[in-house]
Amino acid sequence: MNVHATPKIKGYGISVEPLNGRVAIYRNDILLAESQNAKVMYETRLSPTIYFPRQDVNVDLGDETDLQTFCPFKGTATYHNVNLAGENLANSVWSYEDALPESAAIQGHIGFMPSAYTSIDLGDNRLREPEDGNISGPLIDWLMRGASLADTPEAFTKALAEKMLQHGVAIQRLSILAWSLHPLIVGKHYIWEKGQPEILTRAPTYEIYDHPAFLNSPLRHVSNGMGGVRQRINDDNPHNSFPIMEELREKGATDYVAMPLPFSDGRTNVLTLTCDHPDGFTTENLGLVFECASVIARFYEVFMQRENAQVLLETYVGKRSGARVLGGEIRRGDGDEIDAAIMFCDLRDSTSLEERLGRTAYINLLNEFFETVSGIVHDNGGEVLKFIGDAVLAVFPATDDNPAAARANAQRTSIEIVERLGELRKSEADIHCDCSIGVAYGRVTYGNVGSRERLDFTVIGQAANIAARLGEFGKASGHRIVVSEDIVPACANALPLGKVSLHNVSKPVLSFALRTSADEILNK
């Protein structure tokens, strides 16, 4: 019988050892550094790295450059150019001027980028082969097999923290800052704290970029590509501390790390861990997380991409239409025949407003107009399909349980828009923001039309055409809201206009004007 022994799990490791005798490094025939006190660092999965005392470097090093990189075991590396006769080697050497405890032996030493040298004379020294390690356990197993079952970023964050604890990482707090594509919020911040049953989710707005708490935070430092952060909070006088460290110290934290979570589109998101063990994080703790960081980042990228797609579709085509597209209705011709009330709301005197106000003020006015109209449409169960120049096209689909509701919602929306704009005109004496609205009801196609490369999710049908033409008629006749006879049963106060001939509509349409509390003689 064959017996296979279970291999011993070897965690992430890092060690620094002195080299014996003379060690020298060359670029062709130029001696870059020569020392009797050189050292070698062995780190899991990395090739051995030689470090020279700064005083034993033989070439001119320029000032520190802007480049910084972060290692949770060594700290933040700063870089220098190497200046040779007729040649400048950019960012070709690095050093850890404030090395973390695990790597204190290389503090003040210089490492050379492989592109900076052509050979190293090790003398009688022999370097060990890199050790690949064998990192496994609850966290790895979960990331490989169970993590994909988490259907929300909150569920994933909670499970991630629990698996870290199970794996022996003594975390008190874990947070993920993931940037997003959203017109109002800049991203999502997921925070897990030991003992709390739920994940705290924050959705900061773009004002965060100017907020003092963010400007002087590890989150900004890491996300701006300035390297990661490692802070032993239990030290008496922490170096380069951030204000949040005192808050964490009061909660019993002893160690803190913030490391990049790069997404494939180049954005840098942030993972932070806070430890409550008296001795802080071990090298194996951070090595485990460091090894898993790229996989963890991909899970959050999937979550954010899905959320971004939903948000962008809702922003540009509307909530219902966006849901239909995400649901798979993405082919040209996909759509449904529905009964709906269609509303076309046009800003009056747009050309003269732009000439009088100027482009910037006019755009601000247009945005306020769209915001007002859209909000009222959504509050009454409708959906804005699109903005067409200075006009809004909205749909109020009929439902089987209450088919008359679409008509009522459309007429109520129209009246509320006119009255709200009337209030704005009274509060802003210099800005006369007014509208013309056409509403019609009928059978329309609600779905995709367009070319193979460019589709538009919209409504097509006679009701949509009539709504737009009724709006034009209202402009010419001095009425703010004009509706077809199909809408009238839902209206309490309608003025008959008779049969109206409309452009590109074959038969006259029996139409009515709706009265509102904002009615006044229009200056035409």
Image (tube, helix red, strand yellow):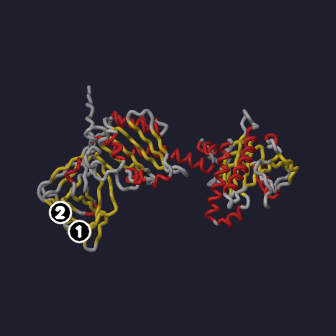
Identify whether 322 is placed above or below 142: below
On screen, residue 376 versus residue 234, left or right, reads: right
Which residue ends up furthest to the bottom in the rendered image?
86
- Residue named by callout 2: 55
Q: Residue furthest left?
A: 21
Identify the residue at the far right of this view. Answer: 498
Give the distance between the C-alpha atoms of the residues marked 1 and 2, in whole angstroms. 11 Å
Q: Residues within 10 Å of mark 1 (few under 14, many from 20)?
A: few
| Image location of residue 276, percent across then percent down | 31, 38
Front in this rendered view, residue 439 or 1: 439
Going from N to C along the chain, the mark reached first, 1 or 2, is: 2
What element does badge 2 sit on? helix
Q: Is residue 385 left or right of residue 47?
A: right
Q: Residue at x 83, y 48 (%)?
A: 512
Task: Identify the residue shown where x is 45% and y is 39%.
Answer: 200
Depth order, front residue of 28/139: 139
Circle 1 residue: 60
Residue at x 23% of width, y 54% of height: 49
Vertical arrangement, residue 472 with respect to residue 145, above or below: below
